[in-house]
Image: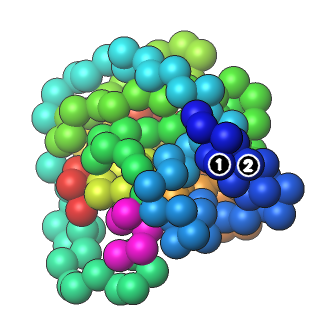
Amino acid sequence: MGPSRSFLAGVIVLLGLSSSTLAAVAPTFDWKLANGWNQTVLPSLGTSVGPFTPPAGAIKTAPKLAAEAASAKAQGKPGGVFICEDIHWKGLCGYAVEPLNECILLSDPWLTAISSFGPDPGATCFAFSSGDCDQNNAQWSFTFPGDDTGGVNTTNPFNDKITSFACVKS
């Protein structure tokens, strides 16, 4: 990472800017770096256990909004997922690019341990606590930049409940 990117990452951390703000300010900067990613790409976060078809109507087909278009400039790969065991992208974190339209059964140390879930731009990921990716059982969905709160302010928090997930191009 060059000096200007190091400086920018430090400013972003100090100011507490969000990943979407980062995408608008530095469109060639990888959003995961501002959230503590050490640039290690894991071979996988689990095991592929079969194909996945998203729930009908779950993927937006309307034109992208300006904010979505700006976030789409952030670096990453559809199918890339950054996860952490603790909220606010803390604790043990991992990143892998998983195949799209495949159900990934999480393995240790990720199984029922995720509190921050962030897909790269260009994909929507569906997460499950059922151990499978039955489209009718999708409990949570994530788009860039994801959720680092464990969903604690929702009626259905995902903190330490995810067992499997699947991502599709959005």
Relative to residue 118, is residue 133 drawn left or right? left
Q: How is the image coloured?
A: rainbow
Residue 168 in view, yes or no: yes
Question: What is the secondary structure assignment of the residue under circle 2?
Answer: helix
Q: Nearer the viewer, residue 151 or 64?
A: 64
> Do the residues bearing badges 1 and 2 touch, measured as CB atoms within 8 Å?
yes
The residue located at (44%, 22%) in the rendering is 41
Q: Nearer the viewer, residue 101 or 22?
A: 22
Quadrant of the snapshot with the N terminus:
top right
Depicted 65 relative to depicted 82: above or below: below
User: Residue 11 lies in what quarter of the image?
Assistant: bottom right
Quote the CA–CA distance across marks 1 and 2. Answer: 5 Å
Q: Position of residue 165 (x, y in %)?
A: 37, 39
The residue located at (67%, 41%) in the rendering is 3
Residue at numbered disc 2: 7
Circle 1 packing at 10 Å, graded few (<14), some (14-19), many (20+), is few
Depicted 121 relative to depicted 96: above or below: below
Residue at numbered disc 1: 4
Circle 2 packing at 10 Å, graded few (<14), some (14-19), many (20+), is few
Q: Position of residue 17 (x, y in %)?
A: 72, 65
The residue located at (23%, 23%) in the rendering is 49
Q: Nearer the viewer, residue 65 or 5?
A: 5
Q: Amino acid at mark 1?
A: Ser
Give the magenta-colored segment's residue range. Answer: 69-73
Q: Position of residue 98 (x, y in %)?
A: 30, 31
Chief secondary structure of the magenta span? helix
Relative to residue 161, is residue 97 drawn left or right? left
Q: Amino acid at mark 2?
A: Phe
Relative to residue 88, is residue 66 drawn left or right? left
